[in-house]
Every structure is written in structure tokens, then in C-alpha cells.
Amino acid sequence: MNKPAKTAITPTRQQDYPEWYQQVIKGADLAENSPVRGCMVIKPWGYALWENMQRVLDKMFKDTGHQNAYFPLFIPMSFLEKEAQHVEGFAKECAVVTHHRLEPDGKGGLRPAGPLEEPLIVRPTSETIIGACYAKWIQSYRDLPILINQWANVVRWEMRTRLFLRTAEFLWQEGHTAHATAEEAMEETRKMLEVYADFAERFMAVPVIKGEKTAGERFPGAVITYCIEAMMQDRKALQAGTSHFLGQNFSKAQEIKFQSQSGETEFAWTTSWGVSTRLIGALIMTHADDDGLVLPPRLAPSHVVIMPIYRDDTQRAEVLAYCKSLRGELMLQRLDDQTIRVDIDDRDLRGGEKKWYHVKRGVPIRLEVGPKDIANQAVFMARRDTGESKSVPRVELVETIGAILEDMQNNLLKRATAMRDENTVTITNEQDFRSFFKSENEENSPINGGFAKCHFVSEDAVKPLLDELKVTIRCIPLDGGTTPGKCFLTGKDAAQMAIFAKAY
RNA sequence: CGGAGUGUAGCGCAGUCUGGCUAGCGCAUCUGGUUUGGGACCAGAGGGUCGUAGGUUCAAAUCCUAUCACUCCGACCA
């Protein structure tokens, strides 16, 4: 009926970026909004992607000496009250449990009953509950360091939500460590930042800038917050991970004390660090195109999908046998240390429909196998990243599949890095700053400038301008952030340089 | 919490102003057929307490009152 759209996703990125984002998620069947306000249902394809992220990160955590544990979902309200800044930061977005029972309300419905003595908070993050445990576990310097991670869900009652980027409940990992010295805790904080940056670039193919948050953007209760910042295709920044040096703020509030080698009682130095399902949002907005999701091979739930093509049952048997043996050969190949993941899609669907289904889901390589290919001992191969498609001898495909996937992985990173670098500029005066962040086509698809590298005297000095333009200080980059220069706004001497951008 | 808007089939909507036959349309689903190296076509079928509660009326998706939910724009944020 309808003639095929030019792109699998409408609208395109150019036409309406936020709507495009939603449509990519829908088209790829990653997740959907749930009946519960602000909460999402992560569907199998999206969850498989998350599981792959988890698997890789979990290994990286273990390789750096961490162990997994699990702490309660509920936190007594009094725990949260202990660290003043922490309370202030999270109080406005906490879900509170006040009752432990339901009873009939006499009108056919239910009402809460059995009020709790002390309300429980559904964890927005677990520093306080984990700290309380550490206070018990730690007596001596011999008990340190404690290096623990937990995979969990947390709840932050956000007003405006968007799938993966900001939802009321989200999945994440949170590392919590305690150390005998500040130096050691700092080293841990920086080490985990490196782990995140490494993961983002090597596995997600998302280039990131490592930096330090300014006081205004810091995690509530932290002394230093490090972050990795990525640029999305609409040139907005997305914070993709954070690593906090908490100093002794939490240990003092929670009495995490130990006896040092010299016999003194000292407060421990703690850190925390986390990444969440938001990474999926980062992945989408970095690589997806107007035909839908594009997955980096190292995280793709499926590397290769084979689509058998046949007319009748005789052909079907022949083609399927060929596909299965092909799959067997491909699965013996490797991408790094992973075996190649291959699916055969033999559903009773038309070829075109099937093709677009996998395009929208971002499967890196599509193979089509029909009688003609069998006759030539070949397969028809299409790459999701470049759209390139051609017939390839079967033997050659099997030999090179690992290299092709690796090439795709590298290609995605290169493409994303080029995009970011093209839209990163050094700005030295207010005029240029203003015009850089003025949207080009404001109505439906704001293009949001990009990353501006600017020297500035202080957060307070630039705040009015930033508020006006809806720009934020993303971070003081570890690379070059402390070289002196002239403030772009006041022209005065400035000791620091930051990345400025509009942000998610 | 301020401003605006929307609730009708799985999804997207029309119908509401001006009350009136059995509540429609597109997509999706199912069945049969023709097709099949590219998001098919033809024929048929299933699927609705019109957000909820009350009121007005011979008659309510439509008018009135109340209420709930959601969306968008602000303020707030991984």
C-alpha cells in the first residue's frame, strides 16, 4: 500500500532528533514505557545488550580486584540523614515506603495499613546502607581495602523521563570501596574512571572525555567527582559514567573507623563509582542512523543473522542445511575472545520485512542464502555500519568474519570520534560562545553547538550566561584542563579550562 | 508544583461544536488464495462496558458536574 519509506525510521535525525530517538528504540524493540509512570520495560533485545555490557564490565571489575555483593533495596530514612549534602542532593527524588500492609477500604479497593515506625527509602544510591555495613566490617587497617561492587536497581523520582536516558527506576552497578589512605582512595577513583573510559571506547565504540566535575556539578557528598562525557549526534553531551572520591565525608558521618598500624583511630577514605542503563542511550545516540540501531560488534547480542531464501519445501531443506553448516563454521570463528554469535531467521515472513527487521535492530552482519548462492558456494553479505552489500565466497567469509567484525567495531569508533572532533572548538570570547550555542533550526531539530573548550575564572562568573543559553560545564578535562589562559567571558587570567556543552 | 492538551479496538485516529439507525477508518492480527532475492496483493473474519462515577433526556461517545490517568512545555536531575 504505502510505498517504502526512504528511511526505516521516521522522522530522521535531521527532522526531529528526540522523536527519532524514541522511534529507534521502538523499531529495535529495545524497551517500552510501562504502565508504571516513568518506568520502562526492557525487552529481550535491549536486555541482551545490557547483559553483554554487564558481562564485560563485571570482568573488568574482577580483574581490578573487586568482588560482587548485594545490599538491601530499602534504606532506613535516618541513614540518609547522616550526610548533610547527600540528603540535600537526593531528598527531592526519593520514593518512600511508609506502610507494610494493605487492607480493604470498604469500597472494593485497597488502602495502606500498618504504618512503619521509621519510613524506608527506596535506594537512590547505596552509599549510606553500604557505609553502615562497612562501619561494622572494618576494625583494623588489616581489613582494608574493601573493594565491592553491586549490580542493582535504584529509584530516583524524576519528573521528566526518557527511555534509558532518565527513568524513575534504572539498572546500574555501583562500586563502593574503603581505603586506609587518601592516596589509595584517589588511585582507586582514577583507576575506575579509566576502566569506564576503556569500556566506552573499546566496547561501546563511544569516544569519551575524562574530566573532573566542578563543585556545582559534583555528586552530593563527594570531594571530587570524575566523569566521562560523550557527544551525541545532536551534539549534546551525555555523562556516561562517574567515579567519586568521597574523602572522609561518609566515613565521618557513618563512623567507618579503623585502627592504623601505629594504633591510632582513623576514618577510612571511601569511593563510589557507577554506570547505568543510560549507557544504552549513549550507544543509540552515538551510532544509530536513520534506518535504526547500529550495534558495535563487541556488544551485539547477535553478530550475524542468516536469512534463508527458498520457494518450496525441497529448496527449504537444502537451503536450511547449508545455513546450518555455515552457522557451524562461523561459530568456530572468534571476535577477540568471544565466539561469533550467529542466528538463523527462518520465520515465515517476506524477505523485505525480515531484512528491515534486522536492520532496525542493528545486527552487524546480515547474510542471505538462497539456491543461487549455494550453487556458487557463496553468501550474500550486508554490513550494517556502511550499508555495503555483496556476494562473498563462503570460504572467504568464514575466514574473515572475525576481521570484518573488528573492522566494523573500529569503524564505528573512528566515525564517532571524527564527529565529536569536528564539533569541538576552542572559544575565547563571549560573542563566539553565544553564536556557537545558538540553535540553527530551533523549531524541530535543534543542533546544539557541540563541545566548547573555554578558560573561565569561576563557576559563579559564568553562571548567568550559562543559564541563559542552557549550557552547562561538563567537566575540567584531565587532559589540558589546568593549563592557564584568559577567561572567555571576563578576559581575566584563568587557571582552568572546561568543556562547555548542552547536556542530557 | 505552574501553563496547555488528550482519554473511542493491540497501535494511530475520525465522530463530540449542532444528542438520533447496528460507533467508523487506517495500520496490525487471523483464515483462504495469488505471490516471494526485498518493507506484497485480493477476498473474508475476529476484536469496543467510547477513562471512571453521577446527572439531564424518549434517546448520551456527544450536553452538565465531579474525579482519575496520561502527554507536551516550564522548574528539578545519572
Image (cartoon, coloured by chain):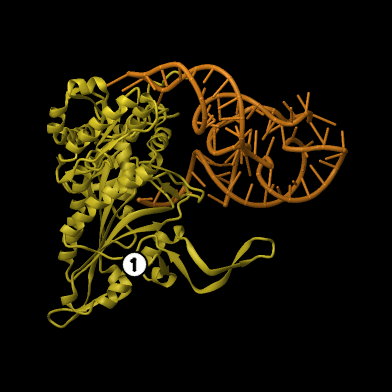
Chain colours: A yellow, B orange
In this view, A430 is above or below A472: above
For the point 45% across and 52% down, the residue is A158
In this view, A461 is above or below A27: below
What number of labels is visible? 1
For the point 16% across and 32% down, the residue is A404
* Residue A28 appears anywhere in the view: yes
Quarter location, residue A362: top left
In this view, A297 is above or below A172: above
| Mark 1: secondary structure | loop
* Residue nearest the observer in this picture, A348 or B37: A348
Q: Which residue is mark 1?
A: A71
* Residue nearest the observer in this picture, A96 or A459: A96
Quarter location, residue A317: top left
> Can you give x and y, in whole percent of width and height, for residue A192 in the image?
20, 56
Quarter in which the C terminus of chain A is drawn = top left
Residue A341 horizontal side relative to residue B55, left or right: left
Classed neighbour count for the residue bearing mark 1: other residues with Cα under 10 Å, few (<14), some (14–19), many (≥20): some
Residue A426 horizontal side relative to residue A288, left or right: left
> Can you give x and y, in whole percent of width and height, for residue A187 in the image?
16, 60
Amino acid type at image mark 1: Phe
> Can you give x and y, in whole percent of width and height, for residue B3 in the image?
60, 41
> Can you give x and y, in whole percent of width and height, for residue A166 in the image?
40, 48
For the point 12% across and 81% down, the residue is A262
Residue A137 horizontal side relative to residue A20, left or right: left
* Residue nearest the observer in this picture, B10 or A432: B10
